[in-house]
Amino acid sequence: MKKPLGHMTALTFALLSGLMFGLGLILAGMANPAKVLAFLDLGGLWDPSLGLVMGGAIAVGLIAYRIAGKRSTSFLGLPMNIPTSRIIDKRLVIGGLVFGIGWGLAGICPAPAFVLLGAGSVKGIVFLIAMLIGMGVFELLESCRKN
């Protein structure tokens, strides 16, 4: 087994990965709520270009998950924690619906919201605050459900 890299090295890789991901979102137009909403507007002036971005991301993700699924440690030497559940339950479906409705109303999802936050966008800030409130409500409901 590989020795894990130091915290600073792992942090450097995380920051560089986040920077590349953010730049990719900007170049693809995913950080532009108007472009996202145009993609979701099937009855109006539909812009299919984000479908190509999503298709490319899915293809890369499939390959990455195939490789990761065969490993016990990451390339940085850290343990792999890949979800194994394949259960589609009510909570997953409702969560997906809430996510989709939020995405459709705002044209923003979590990663582009951080890009918008970095750009000083009020819409991005409001979205992130709403997302954090939603996460808090979820945690509250989960703690009530478990007790």
Image (cartoon, rainbow, N blue to C red):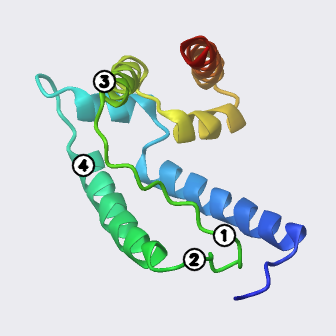
Nearer to us in this view, 33 or 77: 77
Q: Which residue is mark 2?
A: 72
Disc 4 residue type (three-letter): Gly
User: In whole angstroms, how far apart are the C-alphas of marks 1 and 4?
Assistant: 33 Å
Is there a contact, CB below 8 Å, between mark 1 and mark 2?
yes
Nearer to us in this view, 85 or 53: 85
Q: Earlier in the sequence, mark 4 or mark 3?
A: 4
Q: Position of residue 14 (x, y in %)?
A: 72, 62
Identify the image quadrant of the N terminus: bottom right
Is there a contact, CB below 8 Å, between mark 3 and mark 2?
no
**SS at mark 1?**
loop
Q: Residue at x 64, y 26 (%)?
A: 121
User: In whole angstroms, how far apart are the C-alphas of marks 3 and 2?
Assistant: 31 Å
Q: Position of residue 49 (x, y in %)?
A: 25, 49
Q: Residue at x 34, y 19 (%)?
A: 101
Q: Residue at x 67, y 36 (%)?
A: 119
Q: Which residue is mark 4?
A: 51
User: In whole angstroms, how far apart are the C-alphas of marks 4 and 3?
Assistant: 27 Å
User: In whole angstroms, how far apart are the C-alphas of marks 4 and 2?
Assistant: 33 Å
Hey, which quadrant is residue 77 in on the image?
bottom right
Nearer the observer: mark 1 or 4; the answer is 1
Q: Earlier in the sequence, mark 3 or mark 2?
A: 2
User: In whole angstroms, how far apart are the C-alphas of marks 1 and 2?
Assistant: 6 Å
Give the class, few, some or many, for how many residues have Cα within 10 Å of label 2's Cα (few <14, many ≥20): some
Q: Earlier in the sequence, mark 1 or mark 4?
A: 4
Q: Is residue 63 above or below residue 28?
A: below
Q: Which residue is mark 3?
A: 90
Is there a contact, CB below 8 Å, between mark 1 and mark 4?
no
Q: Residue at x 14, y 23 (%)?
A: 44
Q: Which residue is mark 1?
A: 79
Disc 3 residue type (three-letter): Lys
